[in-house]
Image: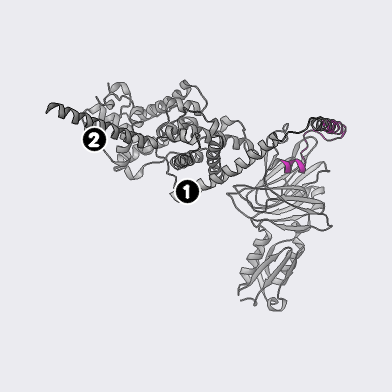
Amino acid sequence: MPPYIRVKSSVLIFILTTMSNQIIKKSKGFNDDVLWSNLKEGDEKSFSILFERYYKDLICYGNSLSPFSEKVQDCVQDVFADVWVYRNSLQDNVVVKAYLLSSVRKRIARLFERDHIFRKTTSTEAIEFLFDFSIENELVEDEVTAERVLYLNKLLNDLPPRQKEALYLRYHQGLSVEQIAELLDVNYQSANNLLYRALLSLRKEWKGSIPLILLISSSVL
Amino acid sequence: MQKRNNYTEIEDFLTDESFQLWVLSKIDEEGWEEWTLENRQRAKLVEDSRLLLLAMKVQDVNLPSSEIHSALEATWEKIEEKELLLRNKSFLKVNKIPRYWLNSAAAVLLFVFLSVWFFKGNSLKSSSEVTYKELIAETDEGLLEQTNNSDKPQSITLSDGSSVLLQPNSKLSYPKIFTGNERKVYLSGEGFFEISKNPKKPFYVYANEIVTKVVGTSFRVKAYSDQPDVEVLVRTGKVRVKSNDLVSDVKKEEIILLPNQALRFTRKDLIFNKINNITEDEILVKSVGNIEQLSFEFTDIPVEQIFETIEQAYLIDIDYPKDKLKDCRLTTSLSDQPLQEKLKIICKSIGNDTKCEMVGNQIIITSRGCE
């Protein structure tokens, strides 16, 4: 009797492991890294999936750098077109989203350089984050919250454009600090500073105006 | 244990997807509500993070999947174009050119280079001069070109409804249809522009070393390649003028011109001179064209006379049923409108199914008389 059970359980374990492997493989089939390497080998389907996955995010980011939405669409599509056309020379270990966001930024900067007739500066550094953060109005229930959120929103929008861009990339596009550093072409420490300073200045101001709210992290510990 | 128990900073919460989901979509999969209430200080931190998240909304881009799909299709088309271009390039590389060919080509190139250098050095042209040809070469769009070799001005209607009165010995290059967010045309010689209003698509006139930017107005640009000055004169609206970026050594200033102001740009010294009152400038007073002298302010004027004024201003023919319109009178102000707009307004004012049609430089008006 016991040997029988043992055989049975090992079969069961085998079945379970193959099943879970399949599940992993299946979900991994839609994982960025796999799609990326399939794309490099010329898989059109993987290209399309990545396009559909990130097109909207890239348009959103592009619109925050340029007021000309038609040109932004053009840039984003060009970025994807180049990915396909030069797929053989793409690098292996990239974070796809960060790579695409960075390519869109570079392309828009290049566009700025070309059409700079009525622009005061021409350097790619001058490419500026234009977005204003807005308020999740439907989630604000009471007046006290509304007041605080409105104030915070104003503080956020008064931050320097680069700090705003760093916050946007960190919390809305989900990039890591390393990726933000690479994208903004600064070193890790500077990127970290951008984020840290943004939050710090928010804290200072906020604390000053609403002393009831203690924002200092040490107070928590 | 749970990683959130170690959270000490707002930053930790903001990057936690499950936390975001809870705040923004009210989906509390991991029991945030309860966890928060466990500890008072923790509750404060959570509340602060929540408020910050609420204040940091990014407007969602409204992109239905149909649009993403058509964008994907457009991208595949782009890819095809790019691949075709690449193939042609590599085809050229593969095709080996015989060596002696290369040698003679190099010799010819050297000769051309030397002679260009020689002539450039000899001519009076300074390096700062920008010509119409260079401007055209800078663009990559396909442009139509209209040259006026006659002795009378010609009128051109652009795809956005703007009209240009091109003077003799002048050239205008413009796209067949304005695409994108800008309207750009290139002028050599003299033209009077009446631009249809569209603040979203500014209109640029490139002429020699300067660029004129407007949103919708009427103005004149005079930029003959063989003359020492470039002039811009404004009739209505507001115009901005700047030097072309191809001219590197000029100060990047932008000059704003209002009605009856003008600007003279000295090409040799690259200096802008603003003229605040055109009636005080002798050269300008003399050169004011027909269209700029004519008034388009009509008060109870017979339609016949209005048509005559337009015919004179734009040097076009208007064909209209004289007997049917002989008793019609109009009061209207057309100064600020391009030709097409002027006609549209007149025909609408006459009413009664009056239609205006423009075929080349001929305008045909059909009407059953005024109301």
Circle 1 sits on which residue?
B69
Could you tell me which residue is drawn at 52 percent across and 31 percent down? A90
Say if labels 2 and 1 share a chain. Answer: yes
Q: Which chain does the residue under circle 1 lie in?
A: B
Q: Quarter holding the C terminus of chain B?
A: bottom right
Q: Residue furthest bottom?
A: B323
x then y, percent, for residue B123: 87, 35
Give the quarter of the image for residue A141. top left
Which stretch is magenta? B108-137
Pointer 2 with pointer 1, Cβ within 8 A: no
Q: Is residue B275 visible?
A: no
Circle 2 sits on which residue?
B33
Could you tell me which residue is drawn at 79 percent across and 31 percent down? B102
* First of labels 2, 1 by sequence position: 2
Q: Is residue A208 left or right of residue B1?
A: right
Could you tell me which residue is drawn at 60 percent across and 37 percent down? A111
Q: Amino acid at mark 2?
A: Glu
Q: Amino acid at mark 1?
A: His
Q: Which chain does the residue under circle 2 lie in?
A: B
x then y, percent, for residue B271: 76, 36
Q: Quarter holding the N terminus of chain B?
A: top left
> Which SS class for mark 2?
helix
